[in-house]
Amino acid sequence: NEKAHFQKWQVVSEVCERLQHQGVDASQVLPQLMDHLEQSKQAVQNDQPGTEQKYSSRENWDREKQLLDDVAKLSHRRGATVSENTIRQTVDQFAADPQTPLSEEQRKAVSQLLTDQSSINVMTGVDGSGKSNTLRAVRVAMEREGYEVIGGALAGKAAAGLHEKTEMPTRTV
């Protein structure tokens, strides 16, 4: 399974489905499976009070922890910004192309992302809300001012999608 986080019932369901195809009665192995999951060094439990108990692989847990540590370090550094003139040129360029028009909200996001002096900026939105087009405009503006822009994603599939939609080089982090 490709999920980064999973619940106990999802593990049980997956194992039972696989065992069923092998002719094994899942009820005979469930107690051992549950013990194994609880004792495994490769499955890490999310023990946050008030949340449904979830697990992650040790590798994914360590990767996410390193990413959070890196973000904490970067949060104290000043980020790259671009001039208002460059932002205006980029927004005008996108407005002139019927393939890449920016909504008013996207124009505001482009400006915010390019003028905020934080080294960490986050943009969220539902599918189809224009995040990729907004990031493409951010990339164009930053490259205009000589910055090298590299996108990052946790998974290879996400990095490939980011590259395809924004035309920026991407890496998994």
Image: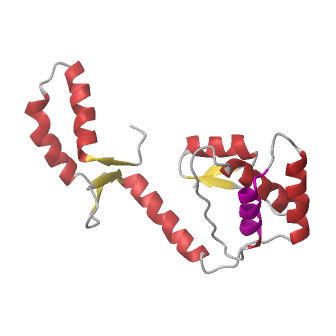
Q: Position of residue 159 (x, y in %)?
A: 62, 46
Q: Is residue 46 left or right of residue 65?
A: left
Chosen colour scheme: secondary structure
Q: Quadrant of the C terminus?
A: bottom right
Report the number of numbered marks: 0
In the image shown, does 167 or 173 lie closer to the viewer? 167
- The boundaries of the magenta stretch are 102-114
Who's the residue at 12% across and 34% down the image? Answer: 29
Q: Is residue 4 left or right of residue 120?
A: left
**Residue 35 in sight:** yes
Q: Position of residue 123 (x, y in %)?
A: 62, 60
Height in image: 20 above or below 71? Answer: above
Q: Is residue 107 left or right of residue 14?
A: right
Who's the residue at 59% across and 76% down the image? Answer: 75
Q: Is residue 66 magenta?
A: no
Magenta segment main secondary structure: helix
Height in image: 91 above or below 77? Answer: above
Q: Residue furthest front?
A: 104
Q: Quadrant of the N terminus?
A: top left
In the image shown, does 63 or 5 lie closer to the viewer? 5
Q: Position of residue 170 (x, y in %)?
A: 68, 49
Q: Quadrant of residue 81?
A: bottom right
Q: Is residue 110 magenta?
A: yes
Q: Position of residue 99 (x, y in %)?
A: 82, 40
Who's the residue at 81% across and 47% down the image? Answer: 101
Who's the residue at 29% across and 66% down the image? Answer: 48
**Residue 149 in sight:** no
